[in-house]
């Protein structure tokens, strides 16, 4: 209250006489409630009204009232300045590939401010989750060394540092200094720095962000890299890549061969992309490429041709049948030319991927407004084609469901897997599984898309199953992981979206029908929910515990 221009400096009148009528009423009500919340008020100064924020705190011991005023315009400016500083720090993180952290034992949480390449998105993490997540990327000996380091600091906070190495050979320096945390207790803060040796090629991908099977970025890492560049206004091209008929490769040659194909495909993509961008695995047989060093279309197409030709050369069509023939389909779009945010850009690239598959696979399609029309119209056209593809004569979902019901109730009861296969194909479900028991175990699974391992499906049902009440037949719907409970865990397991039904009560310990996607999120068609419910009820005719 030291500003001489403010009218309430005068002691000639009570403070509230300087408020306008509505503000005086709001101030009086706040005092009556004993509220210490900020309230918006107007100060009357001659013929002007000055907007301010006012907070009153009563000091009963001293018998006084502490009034605090804040200028909302200065607060807005402070927020803008802080945003600018955050952007500046984010660029420094990216430049040095560093992750800054703080640990407040009083608040029992870690705060992380991460570079785009880090496996840890910026935010707050519970202590146990943070330690488990970091240790999971380290050899056992290194993980124990790191945990011992933190245990020692928690007893005697002091400046210290430790060097360690992850499972991919990346070397790190973790530094720590003591300070005072948000809870008012002693805390630790520091930097996680990744070393890059001069004259040597850095390990592929950033530390802690590598997919263990393919060696490229995890989904979290590659999506965060794309989002960071978009927020910084960097021009990028987003490419979604899918291995053609990958399920057939797994079914015919086995999952070990499928894993080999995934590793070789990732290597081909990484070499073709080189230093023009980054590569990550969305899940299953889907990869995401972020090109940030190319802006001309010819250069972008050259990279994509290199990816396609390299994969084809590794698994050529020899006509001998001894090895799988591997091809890939790709779809892409550019920021900011075609979309203003990551979600819109991803959907547009995904639509181009569908168009590439529709035209025969083993090709790439880049979105071109002159050829494809507006992004909204192009995506809508692709979605209609996807829906119509499952509604053509002979595979009408309603007819298929009626036929199934008749066979199960009155005819020769089909085996469970063929029944699930028919329903999935008729409805255009990407992936599906039936689980039963306590704990839930996979009974059967099917899907034209990339499927997840049984362990991931069982963990998802263990997490979500209790959320489904036995007395309701409504499904649990998660269209994207940031909408659902425990989204971070499900995302780490590889799920893009989930639709979960409880199967009838006759199954004893419980059973579930799980529809899901990997990689990109999926908007589940609510018009199909009644049909899915009927199919789940149909499954209760089977003794799932014995299947």
Image: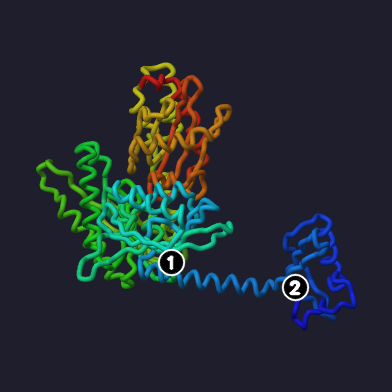
Q: Is residue 273 left or right of residue 89?
A: left
Q: Note whether 346 is above or below 466 in the view shown.
A: below
Q: Note whether 345 is above or below 488 in the view shown.
A: below
Residue tagged by mark 2?
A: 51
**Viewer-closest of 290 and 121:** 121
Q: Position of residue 466 (x, y in %)?
A: 51, 33
Q: Quadrant of residue 366?
A: bottom left
Residue 2 appears anywhere in the view: yes
Q: Are marks 2 and 1 in contact (CB under 8 Å)?
A: no
Q: Is residue 193 left or right of residue 398?
A: left
Q: Residue at x 77, y 83 (%)?
A: 4
Marked residue nearer the N-terminal end (2 or 1): 2
Query: Is disc 2 placed on a helix, strand or loop?
Result: strand
Q: Residue at x 86, y 68 (%)?
A: 21
Q: Residue at x 14, y 51 (%)?
A: 316
Q: Position of residue 331 (x, y in %)?
A: 33, 58
Q: Quadrant of residue 19?
A: bottom right
Q: Residue furthest bottom?
A: 4
Query: Is disc 1 placed on a helix, strand or loop?
Result: helix
Q: Is residue 171 left or right of residue 61?
A: left
Q: Residue furthest front?
A: 156
Count of labels shown?
Answer: 2
The N terminus appears in which quarter of the rendering? bottom right
Assess disc 2: are there few (<14), some (14-19) or many (≥20) residues with their C-alpha within 10 Å of its C-alpha: some
Q: Position of residue 243 (x, y in %)?
A: 27, 49
Residue tagged by mark 1?
A: 230
Residue 375 appears anywhere in the view: no
Assess disc 1: are there few (<14), some (14-19) or many (≥20) residues with their C-alpha within 10 Å of its C-alpha: some
Q: Residue at x 22, y 65 (%)?
A: 201
Tell me how far mark 2 sits from mark 1, CA to CA.
36 Å
């Amino acid at each position: 209250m030291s500003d001489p221009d403010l009218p309430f400096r005068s002691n000639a009148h009570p403070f509230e006489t300087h408020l306008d009528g509505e503000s005086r009423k709001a101030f009086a009500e706040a005092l009556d409630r004993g509220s210490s919340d900020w309230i918006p008020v107007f100060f009357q100064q001659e013929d002007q009204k000055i907007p301010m924020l006012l907070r009153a705190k009563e000091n009963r011991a001293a018998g006084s009232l502490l009034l605090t005023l804040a200028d909302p315009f200065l607060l807005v400016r402070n927020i803008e300045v802080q945003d600018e500083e955050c952007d500046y720090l984010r660029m420094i993180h990216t430049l040095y590939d560093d992750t800054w952290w703080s640990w407040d034992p009083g608040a029992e949480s870690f705060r992380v401010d991460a570079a785009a390449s880090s496996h840890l998105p910026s935010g707050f993490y519970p202590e146990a989750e943070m330690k488990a997540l970091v240790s999971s990327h380290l050899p056992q000996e290194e993980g124990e060394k790191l945990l011992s380091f933190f245990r020692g600091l928690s007893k005697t906070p002091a400046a210290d540092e430790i060097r360690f190495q992850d499972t991919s050979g990346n070397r790190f320096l973790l530094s720590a200094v003591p300070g005072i945390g948000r809870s008012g207790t002693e805390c630790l803060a520091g930097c996680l720095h990744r070393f890059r040796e001069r004259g040597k090629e850095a390990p592929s991908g950033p530390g802690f962000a590598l997919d263990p099977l393919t060696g490229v970025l995890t989904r979290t890492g590659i999506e965060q890299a794309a989002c960071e560049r978009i927020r910084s206004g960097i021009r990028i091209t987003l490419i979604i890549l899918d291995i053609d008929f990958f399920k057939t490769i797994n079914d015919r040659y086995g999952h070990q061969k499928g894993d080999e194909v995934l590793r070789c495909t990732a290597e081909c993509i990484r070499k073709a992309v080189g230093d023009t961008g980054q590569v990550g695995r969305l899940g299953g047989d889907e990869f995401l490429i972020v090109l940030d060093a190319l802006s001309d279309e010819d250069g972008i197409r050259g990279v994509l041709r290199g990816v396609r030709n390299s994969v084809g050369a590794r698994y050529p069509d020899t006509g001998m049948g001894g090895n799988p023939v591997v091809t890939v389909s790709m779809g892409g779009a550019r920021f900011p030319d075609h979309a203003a945010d990551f979600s819109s850009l991803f959907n547009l690239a995904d639509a181009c991927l569908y168009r590439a598959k529709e035209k025969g696979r083993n090709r790439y399609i880049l979105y071109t407004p002159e050829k494809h029309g507006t992004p909204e119209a192009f995506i809508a056209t692709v979605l209609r084609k996807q829906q119509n593809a499952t509604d053509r004569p002979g595979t009408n979902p309603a007819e298929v469901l009626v036929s199934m019901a008749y066979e199960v109730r009155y005819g020769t009861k089909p085996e469970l897997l063929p029944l699930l296969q028919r329903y999935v194909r008729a409805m255009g479900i990407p992936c599906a599984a039936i689980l039963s028991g306590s704990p839930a175990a996979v009974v059967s699974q099917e899907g034209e898309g990339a499927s997840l391992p049984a362990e991931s499906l069982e963990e998802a049902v263990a997490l979500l199953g209790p959320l489904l009440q036995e007395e309701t037949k409504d499904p649990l719907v998660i269209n994207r992981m940031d909408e659902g409970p425990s989204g971070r865990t499900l995302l780490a397991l590889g799920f893009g979206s989930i639709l979960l039904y409880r199967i009838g009560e006759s199954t004893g310990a419980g059973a579930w029908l799980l529809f899901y996607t990997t990689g990109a999120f999926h908007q589940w068609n609510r018009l199909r929910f009644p049909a899915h419910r009927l199919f789940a009820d149909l499954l209760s005719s089977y003794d799932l515990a014995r299947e």
